[in-house]
């Protein structure tokens, strides 16, 4: 082998080394690009998930605010209904007390009427008894008139 062959062999090894170096650089660039693309996809997915979660949170907050408004309205209506029921209850208690008082007064009146009726019946019975005694006394006196005496049996 002569010097020219060695030069050509050296040039071939140099070109080969350059190609291997370039290949290594291309492989590194490819790995970097692939890793960057994977990270970008992952980041894009996370961003989409974050955006979806933020929208869901926003919708949940809106729904919660709407629900809170409905609950406040419901509580207000319940308070109004409770107030009306308390007024009705108080009125019903007052009416019940008045009706009980009226029943008690009617019962007392009934008892007084019955007592007076019994007094009047007693007085009438006493009066009839007095009349009967007077009539009996008259009849006895008529029977005791002087006249012939009849033997008693």
Image: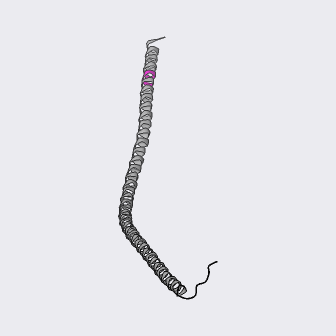
Q: Quadrant of residue 149?
A: bottom right
Name the one closer to the observer, 82 or 89. Answer: 89
Question: Can you name the residue that lies furthest to the top here?
Answer: 1
The mark tally for this picture is 0
Is residue 93 shown above or below 25?
below
Where residue 51 appears, x then y in whole percent? 39, 47
What's the magenta bit mostly, secondary-structure-wise? Answer: helix
Q: Residue furthest right?
A: 153
| Residue 26 drawn above or below residue 13 | below
**Numbered range of the magenta stretch:** 15-19
Counting from the top left corner in percent of width and height, residue 17 is at: 43, 21
**Which color scheme does this rendered protein use?**
one colour
Looking at the picture, does residue 126 appear above or below residue 48?
A: below
- Residue 148 image offset from top left, x and y in percent: 58, 87
Q: Residue at x 45, y 14 (%)?
A: 6
Residue at the image point whose x is 45% and y is 28% from the top: 27
What is the x, y in percent for residue 66? 38, 58
Where residue 30 sits, quadrant-wise, is top left
Q: Nearer the viewer, residue 120 or 81?
A: 120
Q: In the rendered structure, does residue 105 fall within the stretch colored magenta?
A: no
Write the residue at 44% across / 78% down. 123
Front in this rendered view, residue 81 or 140: 140
Quadrant where the C terminus is found in the figure: bottom right
Residue 122 sits above or below residue 29 on the image = below
63 and 10: which is toward the camera? 63
């Amino acid at each position: 082998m002569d010097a020219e062959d060695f030069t050509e062999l050296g040039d071939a090894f140099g070109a080969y080394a350059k190609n291997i170096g370039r290949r290594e650089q291309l492989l590194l660039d490819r790995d970097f690009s692939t890793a960057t693309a994977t990270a970008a996809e992952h980041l894009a997915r996370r961003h989409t998930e974050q955006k979806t979660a933020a929208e869901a949170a926003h919708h949940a907050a809106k729904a919660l605010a709407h629900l809170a408004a409905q609950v406040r309205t419901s509580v207000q209506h319940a308070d109004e209904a409770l107030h009306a029921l308390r007024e009705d209850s108080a009125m019903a208690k007052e009416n019940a007390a008045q009706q009980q008082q009226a029943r008690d007064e009617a019962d007392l009146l009934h008892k007084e009427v019955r007592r007076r009726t019994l007094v009047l019946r007693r007085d009438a019975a006493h009066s009839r008894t007095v009349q009967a005694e007077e009539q009996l006394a008259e009849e006895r006196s008529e029977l005791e008139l002087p006249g012939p005496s009849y033997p008693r049996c």
